[in-house]
């Protein structure tokens, strides 16, 4: 598998799921080019950058299952030992009693004050002063709680020291006491690391890396990113207070933008922590439900923005029932959480990074072979001045990416390797692909008009894209691929345009087709991609593999159910019948292959050992 950049989202103790996802990725043999993380994800990222593997972080097999070799190596037994006892007590004991006492004081104060105003005589003289006293107590408790929360309930000092010890142990720096591992050290001995925190004094995002803060202690940056407001004390760096990076960027996929430009073929894999309540499940109607929803939206809603503009980004939302502060979970629960995440990630990596591209590329290859065979049997091909070995036919699919409504990106294809227009972004306005995409009508056009203007990409704004166009391309056959009923589906529901292009001029194909027949010819090959798209996305589809469509614009199809009734020559009839034969054979073969892929994926998901809520969530995926 190709090079990848890894991104770890924050999520407190729920980040235990990252270890299972990392294990699945390791077993695929990927080459990690860099890691980034926020909050608890920053700690996982730092350990991975130093060279720790998933088995070093937690064991899931044998007598030591559910324990951490890493923690044992630095003198700790469980994750709870990363915090001082009084800090754990503050997190688990102090906050709840203060909140409970505050609520009771409020209830008593309101009751007594109301009773004082409504009562008479003795009760009025007793209730009103007592109510005022209770209100004063309530205010004092709230002030105490506010002070404790604003200053942070617990310290991350012990975690900081133990993390630095673990990094020095892995990098062989134990003989240098007092010299913490810096980002420069990690870059020299391990991998590039990016950590995000929030500078509350300046009100800005702070990015820690070997480029921006080479001499910064990694452990300081990690604990700054983990300092959840009110739970943990802010970390002072360069005299300024820093807190949880999730406030500004909980999924910092953007931190490797420059590296992705230098390694355009590298994928970006983002491990996210999914909230089961945010996946198709309605919350309550109360104020507490509203506030919880606002908090989740503030922390995780920006993920959509952080994904945009990141090429080759694959997000893996990891489902877990572990709580934010469940650092004292049982060994069995640790093992289950890791194995569930591993099984899910393993199945999704196979499907999204291996099987899905393979099926699309195979469909493009089948179309390529069909068009190439038609050319080889053309009576006029012998007159073509281009030598047979240099006659090129390319096939690709331009998809509308999630979140984008004004462009298409060439994603999968056959015969596209080594060409500068592979992976090119095409605007919907100002390109023939966009016109086909909107009109849902197939179109064949010469790349250059008689006056020399470029028909493929028009306008001055596309001049740089035109320089990336394959210079020998003579024509393009653009075919719309619709996921739903063409003409009635909204624009964003139409996923793709199929492109067929060549350096062999159209006359040498000797197709002899009418305009309507050209349209049918294109849609018949487009059916292959549409069937693949529906099958992979498990959408309802009303046509069996190998069965042609029954109509083209304004005409019924006859002759074995595939050829238009009005046709000028026998050559056109032969071409359409051959095209249908190639498409039908490809569809039947692809449908069987895709069914095997989906069955494999379903079996992998069913093996997940999580609770019923997790299984329901995974089935929805």
Image (cartoon, rainbow, N blue to C red):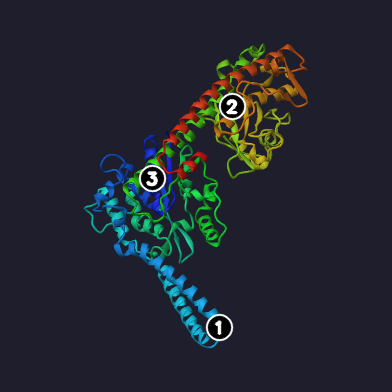
Rendered residue at 59%/45% (across/down):
403
Among the two numbered marks 3 and 2 on one chain, the one whose residue lies closer to the N terminus = 3
Of circles 3 and 2, which is in front? Answer: 3
100 sits to left or right of 124: left
At which x and y percent is residue 124? 53, 85
Neighbor class of circle 2 (other Cα within 10 Å; few <14, some 14-19, many 20+) is many
Name the element at disc 3.
Answer: helix
Question: Which residue is tagged 1?
Answer: 119
Q: Quadrant of residue 319?
A: top left
Of circles 3 and 1, which is in front? Answer: 1
Rendered residue at 73%/31% (across/down):
451
Question: Which residue is tagged 2?
Answer: 395
At which x and y percent is residue 448? 69, 30
| Separation of marks 3 and 1 at Cα, in angstroms | 58 Å
| Separation of marks 1 and 2 at Cα, in angstroms | 86 Å
Rendered residue at 64%/28% (across/down):
542
Of circles 1 and 2, which is in front? Answer: 1
Residue 116 visible, this orientation? yes
Proximity of marks 3 and 1: CB atoms separated by less than 8 Å: no
| Separation of marks 3 and 2 at Cα, in angstroms | 43 Å
Among the two numbered marks 1 and 2 on one chain, the one whose residue lies closer to the N terminus = 1
Residue 239 visible, this orientation? no
Q: How many marks?
A: 3
Neighbor class of circle 1 (other Cα within 10 Å; few <14, some 14-19, many 20+) is some
Question: Which residue is tagged 3?
Answer: 337
Rendered residue at 46%/38% (across/down):
266
Proximity of marks 3 and 2: CB atoms separated by less than 8 Å: no
């Amino acid at each position: 598998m190709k090079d990848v950049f890894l991104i770890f989202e924050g999520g407190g103790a729920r980040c235990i799921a990252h270890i299972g996802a990392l294990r699945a990725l390791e077993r695929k043999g990927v080459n990690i080019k860099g890691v980034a993380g926020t909050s608890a994800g920053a700690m996982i990222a730092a350990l991975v950058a130093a060279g720790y593997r998933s088995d070093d972080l937690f064991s899931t097999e044998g007598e030591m299952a559910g324990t951490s070799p890493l923690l044992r190596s630095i003198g700790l037994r469980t994750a709870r030992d990363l915090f001082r006892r009084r800090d754990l007590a503050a997190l688990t004991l102090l906050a709840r009693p203060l909140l409970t006492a505050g609520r009771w004081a409020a209830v008593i104060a309101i009751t007594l004050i109301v009773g004082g105003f409504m009562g008479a005589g003795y009760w009025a003289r007793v209730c009103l002063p007592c109510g005022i006293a209770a209100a004063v107590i309530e205010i004092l408790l709230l002030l105490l709680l506010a002070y404790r929360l604003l200053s942070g309930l617990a310290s991350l000092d012990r975690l900081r020291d133990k993390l630095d010890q673990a990094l020095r142990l892995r990098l062989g720096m134990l003989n240098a006491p007092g010299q913490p591992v810096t980002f420069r050290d990690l870059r020299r001995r391990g991998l590039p690391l990016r950590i995000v925190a929030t500078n509350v004094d300046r009100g800005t995002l702070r990015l820690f890396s070997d480029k921006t803060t080479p001499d910064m202690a990694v452990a300081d940056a990690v604990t700054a990113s983990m300092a959840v407001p009110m739970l943990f004390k802010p970390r002072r760096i360069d005299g300024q207070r820093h807190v949880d990076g999730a406030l500004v960027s909980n999924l910092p996929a953007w931190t490797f933008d420059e590296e992705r430009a230098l390694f355009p073929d590298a994928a970006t894999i983002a491990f996210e922590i999914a909230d089961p309540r945010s996946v198709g499940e309605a919350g309550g109607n109360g104020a507490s439900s509203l506030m919880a929803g606002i908090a989740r939206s503030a922390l995780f809603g920006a993920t959509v923005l952080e994904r945009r503009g990141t090429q080759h980004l694959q997000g893996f939302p990891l489902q877990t029932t572990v709580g934010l502060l469940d650092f004292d979970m049982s060994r069995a629960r640790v093992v289950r959480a890791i194995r569930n995440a591993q099984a899910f990630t393993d199945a999704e990596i196979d499907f999204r990074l291996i099987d899905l591209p393979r099926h699309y590329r195979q469909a493009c290859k089948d179309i390529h072979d069909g068009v190439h065979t038609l050319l080889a049997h053309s009576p006029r091909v012998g007159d073509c001045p281009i030598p047979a070995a240099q006659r090129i036919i390319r096939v690709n699919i331009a998809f509308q990416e999630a979140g984008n409504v004004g462009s298409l990106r060439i994603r999968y294809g056959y015969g596209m390797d080594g060409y500068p227009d592979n992976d090119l972004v095409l605007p919907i306005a100002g390109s023939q692909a966009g016109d086909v995409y909107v009109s849902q009508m197939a179109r064949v056009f010469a790349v250059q008009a008689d006056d020399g203007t470029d028909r493929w990409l028009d306008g001055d704004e596309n001049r740089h894209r035109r320089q990336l166009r394959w210079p020998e391309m003579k024509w393009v056959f653009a075919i719309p691929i619709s996921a739903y009923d063409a003409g009635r589906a909204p624009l964003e529901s139409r996923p793709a345009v199929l492109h067929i292009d060549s350096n062999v001029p159209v006359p040498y194909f000797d197709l002899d087709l009418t305009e309507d027949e050209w349209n049918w010819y294109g849609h018949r090959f487009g059916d292959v991609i549409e069937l693949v798209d529906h099958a992979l996305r498990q959408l309802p589809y009303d046509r069996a593999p190998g069965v042609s469509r029954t109509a083209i614009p304004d005409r019924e199809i006859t002759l074995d159910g595939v050829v238009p009734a009005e046709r000028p020559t026998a050559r056109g009839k032969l071409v359409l019948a051959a095209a249908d034969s190639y498409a039908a054979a490809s569809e039947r073969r692809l449908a069987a292959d895709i069914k095997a892929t989906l069955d494999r994926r379903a079996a992998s998901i069913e093996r997940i050992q999580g609770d019923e809520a997790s299984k329901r969530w995974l089935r929805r995926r």
